[in-house]
Amino acid sequence: MYIFATEVDIHSQSLKDWVLVYILTGSVVLLNLFPIILPPKANSFSMDSAVYLATLFLYGLNFALQVLFIFSVIELYRNQRMSAWRHLFNFSMYCLMISGAYYSFLFFNGDIGKINVHHLFPYLISLLVYFSINVLLIFLFFYFIGQVFKGALELGVLKEACVGYSVTLLLSMVLAILLSEEKYFGLSLFIILVTILSIVFRKFLELYQLVSNRANKDHLTGLYNHGFFKETLKEQFSDCKMLKQPLTLAFLDLDDFKKYNDRNGHLQGDRLLAFFGKLLQKAVEGTSFTVARYGGEEFAILMPNTTKEDAYAFLNRLRKEVNDTYFEGVEHIPYRCLSFSCGIAEMEKDMHESDELIHRADQALYYAKAQGKNNVQLYDKHNMSLDEIRFKQDLEALEQQVKFFLSKDVYTYRHSKRVFKYALEFGSRLDELTDHERQTLVLGALIHDIGKIEVPRDILNKRGKLEKHEWEIIKKHVTWGREIVAAEKRFDDLLPLVELHHERYDGKGYPYGLKGEEIPKLARILCIIDSFDAMTTERPYQPTKTFEEALEEIERCAGTQFDPVYAAKFIAFVRKHYLPLAEMEQLN
Amino acid sequence: MVYDGIILSLLIGWFRGGSLKGLANMKLRGGWLFPLLLAVQFAVFFLQERVAWIAKMSNGIFLLVYIIGLVFLWLNRHQPGFPVIFAGVLLNFIVMALNGGRMPVSIEAAQFLGREYIEALKAGMYGKHQAITSETLLPFLGDIIPLSPPYPRQQVISIGDVVMNVGAFLFIQHLMLSAPRHGADDAENETTAAPANQ
């Protein structure tokens, strides 16, 4: 304000100058109405800075500030919803930027009044000052308002801003030359050019958004599609994990949709899906939730920053609302109303991958279906145990796979069997595990080294020390194992065990270097058993330890390599059940 | 100048795919005021040289016309463009009211309009205009913007006129582009009714 009051002098100028001020102001307004929008991220920069700078270079500070003032008055009139102090802030910021640029221009011997192409340095400096004042003030603004926006200082953003500003400088030079050569006609050429550019870029953006929407949206319901949902889930999963915020996933499945389709025809079925999609869309309006059509009649809602209890309340309310909504043809299905079943799962600390969340929500959904449909269920590991027959089947299937080692690498075959046995016995003595977790641990123990089937025989059976690159290959067995096990969907629960049983409690393990509680509980337990067996059996590449020595080693590494709680329990378990046997063997 | 603006608006509206039918949708409060005001202005303009008392009263009448016009605009301020027209007319009104009911014209800017015009202006005899002198208040709101080639007509206008025209432009664009267009909606329906799952 002060700068404005001291620098502006409206009395001494002629009416001709007034016309110039009007026209410059008009062009600033126009350029603000037509900012140039750049796809793909809808960054826009308006070219008004170019006008201010060109005015500054040609006519001096007084003019530029007048243009700014009239423009601000127009903005005040036009944008009455914005609070007055924000208008004032904008005005003062531009005042500072313009005068800062002006004085630095003078300081480096710039000539006001004509463009000197042999001495470009002052122009550069004044733009730099203009730019830095802008960035600084905007940063301070957001800092004091208390919302330092994420990524404000990221390199990418800064880079883009730099591009924008160098374009501004170039354009201001162009405009200044046009103005000094052909005054009004030059200015109008410039304005027309920039406006047309803006319109063209806007068309590009529309086209881009149209295409990207096609790729991300399901065309029947208008919700996001499966692929986009998976991607969003992955992002949100890692974000929420890093920020330690809750993340909840809900799967919804329309009840008896197949019957509805059979009675009313597929076209009507599609209409129901579209209708239900709209209902969901409306339900999440104004929240940060993401709704997607997961496939067929299955829908998914991703709820960041929401605990499972809140999600339960939300979805149960939605369920009742849906029950009360009539849709043509629902009288022919068993419930005689529109209904869905829903399963909810919340991210937990030891979850490693977003797929686990999907798996859990899916299980909860199946449970909800089994409970007679039209209800909402939270994932609860106690409800989800496998029955004995399925467990036996799974065990047999996995044993078949492990048998491949009989011919290729008998060490690994025996090792897998032993670890399986330890897991069975140790697991049954761990009271905190649910039935399901116990079964998972046992199956995982059996299959955990399956990836070694990909490791060449001569590395597996090599006597003597392994080379560095050979170790690298051995280390890959966890990833390969994961790929093998992932081939069958029913073994999804085992994936973390196979992939993460070489992670260390202190974060120095492989393949990801996870730390502490980040490693799934079962993988931490398996790691102890696996290491114990590895130490106590004959292996080509290391000396054998006795049970007692191995236990001492585990004790020593508890807290670094192993989870201290389970390490202690395991030591107690072996002491009680194996050491007496081993001692007897020695005696004999 | 006002007519130039309207013609330009119609042309651009047409290029943007608008339709003249939209103009029929114009719903203004107190719409009958507008032609009346126009008629009064013309009457005064032609009669003031013949009838002495009208010449005397002309300044007052012009101001009154402006005031009624402003009221009319204010009544319709929710129409797109009208706040802008209002601002423009207000600017003109302010400068006229402050300078005795006549629009100050810059001699310098009006040079090319011809010697007779300038003489008449200086004598204070030309319609509702007068020359800008050192006593003129807020001279920068007067008729100081010369329209010159490449613009096809030669005239001097005020910033208020410009703002007013911008408002009229916005209003006409709104009318022309909001006319219902057939065909576009039907095509959209067709693309969404595609085969689906299950």
Image (tube, rainbow, N blue to C red):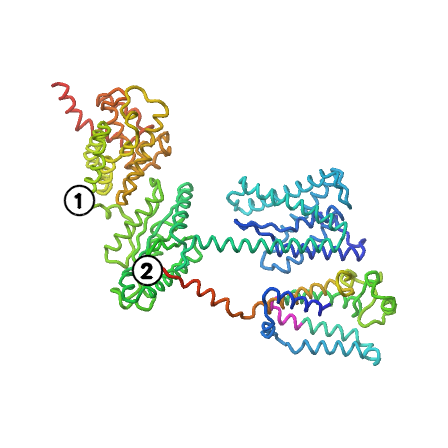
Q: Name the quadrant containing residue A140.
A: top right
A19 to the left or right of A327:
right
Q: For the magenta stretch, what is the residue range?
A: B71-80
- Amino acid type of the residue tagged 1 in the rendering: Glu
Q: Which residue is mark 1?
A: A388
Q: Residue furthest bottom?
A: B51
Q: Is residue B32 above or below residue A142?
A: below
Q: Could you tell me if residue B138 is visible in this image?
A: no
Protein chain holding label 1: A
Q: Name the quadrant containing residue A269.
A: bottom left
B98 to the left or right of A406:
right
The front one of A323 and B94 is A323
Tag in front: 2 or 1: 1
Protein chain holding label 2: A
**Tag count:** 2
Q: Is residue B91 above or below residue A376?
A: below
Q: Could you tell me if residue A286 is visible in this image?
A: yes
Q: Which residue is mark 2?
A: A319
Tag 2 near tag 1, CB within 8 Å: no
Secondary element at tag 2: helix
